[in-house]
Image (cartoon, helix red, strand yellow):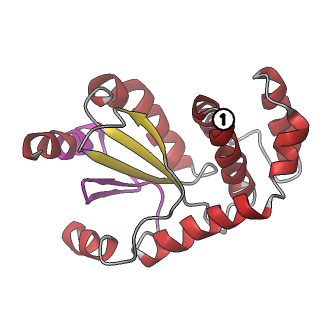
Amino acid sequence: MRSLMAALVFTGAAFSQVKPLVEGNAGSAVRAVIYEDLQCSDCANFRVMLDRQILPKYGSKVAFEHRDFPLPKHKWARPASVAALYLQTVKPELSVEWRRYAMSHQSEITPENFQAQLSAWASDHGVDTAKLLAALDDKALNAEVEDGYQDAVARGISHTPTVLVNGEPFIETFTFEEISQGLDKALREQ
């Protein structure tokens, strides 16, 4: 399945023109492309693994690229992705912090209170709340999220998280040991 998925992933058009958010070593030849949905519980679990295990071990050696893949079944995932994209233009670290917050507070955020939650987070982080809320309706930012989503679909992505380590897919639920093997292999082959 993994080799079939890898073939599907790399036969499409070039990645989106949007500069991806990168954690870790942005200059590394080893890339872990993370397709994530900020409302996805498996993505939240992966975020914890990323922060506690993967970045401490591999952050100096690997580039971890975030790609938004808000699933249609998640009602506040798309505006959360738009907010993350806007925050990336303000300060990339804010985008990372918003992603962490959204994923760790999924049980508290609803479609009805999403903007209030986002506003409170922005206020706590010194972000201009009015500009952030206005960005949710920005056509260009929404188009970038949609283009990224459609590009991922064209590549065969259908589940979150999907992490491509130099093209090798790790899909939905996988262990630290499994992805570590993939990262170690990619590092050896560089």
Crowding at dot 1, Cα within 10 Å, few <14 / some 14-19 / many 20+, comes out as many
Front in this rendered view, residue 53 or 19: 19
Residue located 91% across and 39% down the image: 130
Q: Is residue 190 left or right of residue 159?
A: left
Residue located 61% across and 48% down the image: 38
**Residue 124 locus on image (x, y percent):** 80, 21
Front in this rendered view, residue 94 or 2: 94
Residue located 27% across and 38% down the image: 28
Q: Quadrant of residue 133?
A: top right
**Residue 110 locus on image (x, y percent):** 80, 49
Q: Secondary structure at mark 1?
A: helix
Disc 1 marks which amino acid? Trp
Residue 35 forms part of the magenta stretch: no
Which residues fall within the magenta stretch? 159-182
Quadrant into which the C terminus falls: top left
Front in this rendered view, residue 176 or 133: 133
Q: Is residue 7 left or right of residue 127?
A: left
Q: Is residue 75 left or right of residue 51?
A: right
Q: Quadrant of residue 188?
A: top left
Residue located 33% across and 71% down the image: 9
Q: Quadrant of residue 68?
A: bottom right
Quadrant into which the N terminus falls: bottom left
Q: Which residue is mark 1?
A: 98
Q: Is residue 172 left or right of residue 118?
A: left
Residue 170 forms part of the magenta stretch: yes
**Residue 59 locus on image (x, y percent):** 33, 28
Q: How many marks?
A: 1
**Residue 173 locus on image (x, y percent):** 38, 52
